[in-house]
């Protein structure tokens, strides 16, 4: 049984991410997923950190419900740090050895800030396979 850390924000409820998770389930029916939604602030300069975190928690809960409605077992859904890389690092440090891979869902090139920051490549430094899913915002 593999356990996957699924990292997504605007794509957390996307059909592309759900399809990839279903594919992983087809390969391993015992697979489990933990959804991590970084608390990414809205565009602009001024934002309230607690509000951003609350919105990320709501997005994580809504995405968990949407994925579970499609038969995808999500053990937990939670908000993480504003930085996707720091959010991943904190989760991996809090649960050493708990995950077999990272599923990172981003917007397509162009609108994706995470791709411009090279998050998908930099996540490989954590020593786990990174499965990159490009999806549209749900």
Image: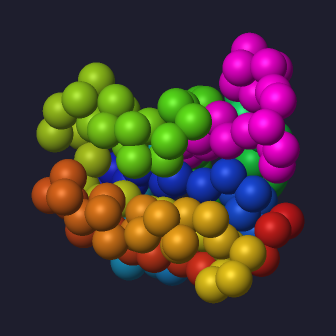
Residue 107, how many percent across, how many down? 68, 73
Residue in the picture at 57% in, 36% down: 82
Quadrant (top left, top right, bottom left, bottom right) of the N terminus: bottom left
Q: Is residue 19 above or below residue 12?
A: below
Number of numbered discs: 0
Q: Is residue 121 left or right of residue 48?
A: left
- Residue 70: tell me if it is visible: no
- Find residue 130 and report its horizontal and vertical position in percent: 33, 68
In the visual, does 38 lie left or right of 60? left
Q: Is residue 117 above or below residue 45?
A: below
In the image, is residue 48 part of the stretch drawn in magenta? Answer: yes
The residue under the point 16% across, 39% down is 97
Please provide percent x and percent y for residue 25. 47, 69
x then y, percent, for residue 123 = 31, 59
- What is the span of residues highlighted in magenta in the rendered image? 35-55
User: Is the residue 124 above or below the residue 75 in the image?
Assistant: below
| Residue drawn at point x = 20 percent, y = 52 percent | 126
Q: Residue at x 81, y 68 (%)?
A: 137
Q: Please identify the residue farthest to the front as the structure is shown.
A: 45
Image color mode: rainbow
């Amino acid at each position: 049984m593999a356990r996957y850390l699924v990292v997504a924000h605007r794509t957390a409820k996307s059909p592309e991410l759900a399809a990839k998770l279903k594919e992983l389930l087809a390969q391993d029916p015992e697979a489990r997923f933990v959804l991590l939604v970084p608390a990414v602030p809205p565009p602009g300069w001024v934002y309230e950190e607690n509000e951003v975190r609350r919105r990320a928690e709501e997005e994580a809960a809504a995405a968990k419900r949407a994925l579970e409605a499609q038969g995808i077992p999500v053990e937990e859904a939670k908000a993480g740090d504003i930085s996707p890389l720091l959010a991943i690092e904190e989760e991996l440090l809090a649960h050493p050895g708990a995950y077999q891979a990272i599923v990172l869902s981003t917007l397509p090139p162009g609108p994706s800030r995470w791709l411009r920051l090279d998050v998908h490549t930099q996540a490989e430094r954590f020593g786990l396979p990174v499965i990159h899913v490009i999806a549209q915002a749900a």
